[in-house]
Image: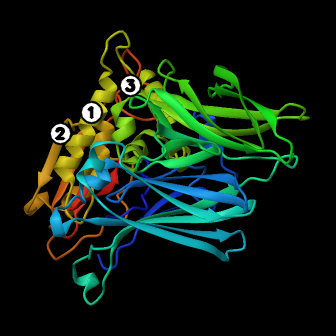
Amino acid sequence: METRPLTRTVDVDTVITRSPRGARFACWVVIGALVVAIPAAGARRDEGDEGPGPLPWRVGGPLGFTVDAAAFPDSGGNVLEVYTRIPPATLATRVGAGSEAQRLSVSARLRNRFGAKQHEASQEFQVVAEDTASFGKVVLLRFPARPGRYRLQVRVEDPRSRKRGLAYVGRTVREKASVEGEVVVPQAQAGREISDLEFAWAETPAEQAGSFRRTSTPGESVGVLPNPERLYGLLAGDLRAVFVARSSSPAPRPWRWAARIMDASGKVVAERESTGAAGRSLTQAVRFDVSTQPAGGYDLEVKAWQEGDAGALSRRAHFGIAWQPSSWNTDPVEVEDLMHFLLDSGDEEESFARMNAGEQERFLDEYWRQRDPTPDTAENEARTAFLARIDHANRTWGRAGLGKGMFSDMGRVYIRHGEPDEILRQVIPAGDQTLTQVLQELEVSQDRPTGSVNSKGPGGDQRPFEIWIYEGRDELVGSAPIVAGPRPARRLLFLFVDDQGYGDFRLRYSTE
């Protein structure tokens, strides 16, 4: 069985980044302690790009959040708006009362392509119970910016937290999580400007708290509650997006605009066209009913022009549609943890991690559809069994300080092969049942040498061990679909050794 190491430990100082080869890292700082093809969305990044990939960026863990950004033309040039959504699951763990009310801080730093710091901004807010029962909390930070590429870092911190333990004696270390990647402020188009598309959760009265006002003409405003997730479907059947277009002509002329939604194959699934009032600028809210569209990744394209223009201004952005509650509520780290067992390579895991929640839902539906042993029934037994094995592994082999049971050696083998047909267990080996004797027997009976499983102590190796034996069965997961009919039997043997005597059994030998 191939095992790919995870670069994740347990803590809440989370920094999401990417290696130059694109390998995903969730580096949680601790001191002292397929038949199914990956959709093209996973390859939208440039080769060699360092960062979390295209916006939006989702950060999992105890301080999970989502970041999106949009650039808008301004009287002084451009304004880059950075939206950070703190979901209800994160806020629920921080709700306090009275003088003990909890607070969170959101900060952002913008650097140019040469690494020089351009701007910094931060906002601190009190966590209230109302935020945990809705869309969560959205924090807006604005930066003046010229067209070009920038490095954006966003951090969420609990300013009142303080880590405890020997590693933090004499130091004040706060709980925090951050993400950093590249954003682009677009150039003007033929002397005219059009903003990025600002995905909205809802249109609101312009004066409503928490909404952001867009002014098209004097006295007219559109209130917007941004949707940094860019996710629609189960909890939002209507897609809403706002854009701003600005002409270089001093003479006011009527505007026209068109918008369309395309699926992953490029097919147009919805479109509309309308007009705007005469003026030098146009602020428009676009709305589509997406309640009949299946889960997946989509593109929204908007064009705007005035009478007499040689061509239209255009902008395009990616978003997702998802219908499963897990797509909306599950920590992205939890989803990627599961995929570690289902995909065959780190590159496939990386591609999956870069998908939006709708694309991930569509991918998983197709993955398990191809492995459903009884496709004519409502239940997919393969998927149900896989999730049951994950749950059993976490409950059985999870240990404080050792992480989730699913990532223990025993957990990995159990998830892949299920319950062993036979288990030979020795807690206090003695006599002819020591590990030394077992290794000698394996050398004689098996084709594969035992290698350097070191012995300890005079009179035989007395480390606790377990041997799991499988007499031959179908694997539950892997790149090959489950098929009906007899399969050749394959006897497998796995030897686990508790090196330190603390119950942490490590895989030291197998015939797989």
Q: How far apart are marks 2 and 1 (CA)?
A: 9 Å
Q: Which amino acid does label 2 sit on?
A: Glu
Residue 148 at what x, y percent from top left? 75, 61
Whichever of callouts 2 and 1 sits on the residue coming sooner in the sequence is 2
* Rendered image quadrant of residue 65: bottom left
* Rendered image quadrant of residue 489: top left
Q: Can you see residue 479?
A: no
Q: At x 41% / y 27%, what residue is drawn?
A: 323
Q: Which residue of the protein is positioned furthest toward the front in this rendering?
A: 219
Q: Which amino acid does label 3 sit on?
A: Pro
Within 10 Å of disc 3 (Cα), the crowding (few <14, some 14-19, many 20+) is: few
Residue 103 at what x, y percent from top left? 30, 66
Where 470 sits versus 462, above or below? above
- 163 to the left or right of 110: left
- 451 to the left or right of 294: left
Within 10 Å of disc 2 (Cα), the crowding (few <14, some 14-19, many 20+) is: few
Residue 154: give its label.
none
Q: Which amino acid does label 1 sit on?
A: Glu
Q: Can you see residue 25?
A: yes
Q: How far apart are marks 3 and 2 (CA)?
A: 19 Å
| Pointer 1 residue | 471
| Pointer 3 residue | 488
Where 480 sits versus 52, above or below? above
Where 305 sits versus 211, above or below? above
Q: What element carries label 1?
A: loop
Whichever of callouts 3 and 2 sits on the residue coming sooner in the sequence is 2
Q: Of residues 149 and 246, which is closer to you in this image?
A: 246
Residue 422: give its label.
2
Q: Of residues 480 and 222, which is closer to you in this image?
A: 222
* Figure quadrant of the N terminus: top left
